[in-house]
Image (cartoon, rainbow, N blue to C red):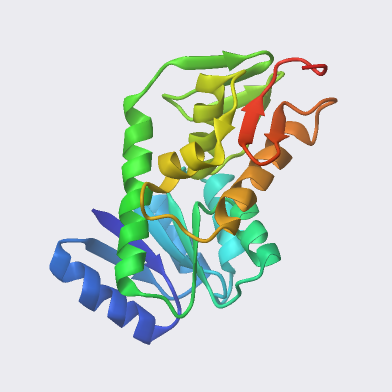
Amino acid sequence: MRILIIEDNPDIVANLYGFLEPKGYVLDSAANGYGGLGLAAQNDYDAVVLDVMLPGLNGLELCQKLRGELGKSTPVLMLTARDTLEDKVAGFDSGADDYLVKPFSLVELEVRLRALVRRARGAQTASPMLTVGELTFDTANFEARRAGRPLALTRTGFTILRLLMKEAPNVVTREALEQELWGEDRPDSDALRTHIHALRQALDKPHPFAMLRTIPGIGYKLVSEADE
């Protein structure tokens, strides 16, 4: 597994190398945002470990460029010392797939990396075109559109959308979504909520009615018409 580490703290980088390389990971690293963006543009990685507070180009800006300018859907695990819900939403909105607060366990970081890569590889094996009303999702190319307008989503956002579209118009429980996303390695209770928020912003905000509906106490579903 090839991982790009973009982190300006040399102690953290050394710890990651010392922990991951003996396990067979191939690592590249950059100590600033522009250097990390350059490596991401030149190479293909299975995942990116990205610090938020970076010199030159911060992690949020880098992640936006990674998704937008480079068109990369590589899973991104974001590292930060900030743990408020607003900070997590900002990270996910920028294109991150998962979020780990410093100080963190190296074991937990590896577990999350493996989960991100496993989901990404699993998504690549399925290639049908999914359609719900004016919403389409080409799962082979990770291209989702509503009324012809492309949706900018993270890998996790695409995973949630795929499951909701496959089950539509039925309700998908929170437990089913969490199992699909994280298996038994579930993060804190805010994680799914922040991913749903980011998906809702991309899917519904520019349009006249909301396709993504919350079923209180149960889960979520997609509808194709405004009155459903």
Image side of residue 209 versus residue 51, left or right: right
| Residue toward you, 116 or 75 | 116
Q: Residue placed at 42% from the left, 42% from the top?
A: 179
| Residue toward you, 216 or 66 | 216
Q: Is residue 44 visible?
A: no
Q: Is residue 46 above or below residue 21?
A: above
Q: Is residue 119 visible?
A: yes
| Residue toward you, 114 or 3 | 114
Q: Quadrant of residue 92?
A: bottom right
Give the percent coordinates (x, y) of residue 34.
51, 66
Q: Residue placed at 63% from the left, 43% from the top?
A: 196
Q: Which residue is at the far right?
A: 208
Q: Residue placed at 30% from the left, 53% from the top?
A: 114
| Residue toward you, 175 or 94 | 175
Give the percent coordinates (x, y) of residue 60.
61, 62
Q: Is residue 44 above or below residue 16?
A: above
